[in-house]
Amino acid sequence: MSSKIKDFESAIGELEALVKQLEEGDLSLDTSLELFERGVKLSRYCHQRLEEAERSIEVLNERGEVQPAPDALHAADDDADEPGR
């Protein structure tokens, strides 16, 4: 199990493999906890990368000019940063 996360695709692949291992249930408690902790790190990494990608989306207007993503998209990010959400 590699501790460095290379990219989104490899993180998703590793996360899927971890879930499969955990679902099989043939692991010691210590191993299960290690895999779970790694899965949380991978999940957070993937979520962060998706948020970054979402923030960098640009929308084409009717004339084909590139414009920044709508403010509503950024407002959703601000709401997600509030405690308790």
Image (tube, grey):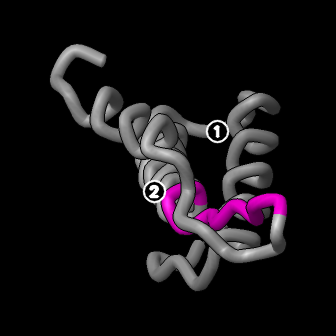
State which quadrant residue 57 falls in: bottom right
Query: Residue sitting at 64 percent across and 39 percent down?
Result: 27
Query: Residue sitting at 65 percent across and 70 percent down?
Result: 8
Q: Nearer the viewer, mark 1 or mark 2?
A: 2
Looking at this view, name the residue that lies furthest to the front: 63
Which residue lies under the disc numbered 2?
Answer: 48
The reply, left or right, for residue 78 in relation to residue 43 is left
Residue 63 position within the rendered picture, expressed as x and y whole percent measured from the top left:
82, 69
Query: Residue sitting at 52 percent across and 77 percent down?
Result: 5
Relative to the observer, which residue lies in front, 6 or 2? 6
Looking at this view, name the residue that lies furthest to the top: 84
Which residue lies under the disc numbered 1?
Answer: 27
Which kind of residue does numbered mark 1 sit on? Answer: Leu
Q: Can you say which quadrant of the picture contains the N terminus?
A: bottom right
State which quadrant residue 25 falls in: top right
Relative to the observer, which residue lies in front, 10 or 32? 10
Q: Which residues are magenta?
A: 54-62
The reply, left or right, for residue 18 in relation to residue 34 is right
Q: Is residue 24 magenta?
A: no
Q: Can you say which quadrant of the picture contains the C terminus?
A: top left
Q: Is residue 17 visible?
A: yes
- How packed is label 2: few (under 14 Cα within 10 Å), some, or many (20 or more)? few
- How packed is label 1: few (under 14 Cα within 10 Å), some, or many (20 or more)? few
SS type, badge 1:
loop
From the viewer's perspective, is residue 58 above or below residue 42? below
